[in-house]
Image (spheres, rainbow, N blue to C red):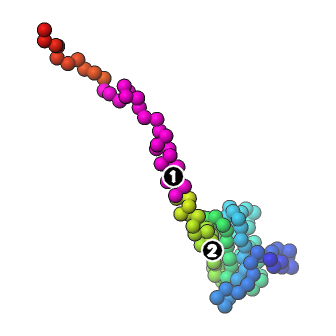
Amino acid sequence: MVIDDTKNEVDVFGIHEGKVLAGEVKVKAAEFSKDEQIVRDVALSRRLGADIHLMAATDIIDDGLQSQARELCESYGLELLVLHEPQLRPGLADQRDARDRRREAVAAASTPRPRRGDTKAPSTPGPEPRT
């Protein structure tokens, strides 16, 4: 963690592909939407002399948050590197899909079947028996 003279901090500061990288890592991407967090984070990366701003979270960072960060980075002349669940936890999506399929199969198997008498159409009178 690096703290600047304004007492703001970045979680990651280092070199990536020969360029200075600075940025934030959140457990929940929703944290980026609070209290102008992205604005402060990108501005701090610029003040620290970064070439790349990192925006990372262990879950999915939605397109709106990524767009906001990208616009700010472009206005400051920074590149944006987004790392989130697809890159940081690639097997998780597969696990979630398998779990959802199991739940659907269990739900389908546990759906009550109509009783036999409920499935027949109402009877209509047939021909009179011959006597």
Q: Residue at x 86, y 74 (%)?
A: 7
Residue 5 location, x and y as percent? 86, 79
Q: Residue at x 63, y 78 (%)?
A: 81
> Which residue appears farthest toward the bottom when viewing the image?
18
Using the image as rendered, state which of residue 119 and residue 61 is in the foreground: 119
Tell me the CA gap for discs 1 and 2: 31 Å
Which quarter shows the C terminus?
Answer: top left
Residue 81 is covered by the magenta coloring? no
Q: Residue at x 68, y 88 (%)?
A: 19
Give the image quarter of residue 1. Answer: bottom right
The magenta span reads 98-121
Secondary-structure class at tag 2: strand
> Which residue appears farthest toward the left when viewing the image?
131
The reply to whether callout 1 and callout 2 are in contact (CB within 8 Å) is: no
Query: Which amino acid is tagged 1?
Result: Arg
Query: Which amino acid is tagged 2?
Result: Val
Q: Earlier in the sequence, mark 1 or mark 2?
A: 2
Residue 116 versus residue 32 in the image, above or below: above
Q: Main secondary structure of the magenta part?
A: helix
Q: Is residue 104 left or right of residue 14?
A: left
Q: Residue at x 72, y 73 (%)?
A: 24
Residue 100 is covered by the magenta coloring? yes
Q: Which mark is residue 4?
A: none
Q: Which residue is mark 1?
A: 102
Q: Which residue is mark 2?
A: 82
Specify few, some or many for label 1: CA neighbours under 10 Å numbering under 14, 14-19, or 20 or more: few
Specify few, some or many for label 2: CA neighbours under 10 Å numbering under 14, 14-19, or 20 or more: some
- The answer to whether one can see residue 50 in this image is no
Residue 123 versus residue 90 in the image, above or below: above
Residue 44 versus residue 104 in the image, above or below: below
Using the image as rendered, state which of residue 106 and residue 46 is in the foreground: 106
- The answer to whether one can see residue 79 in this image is yes
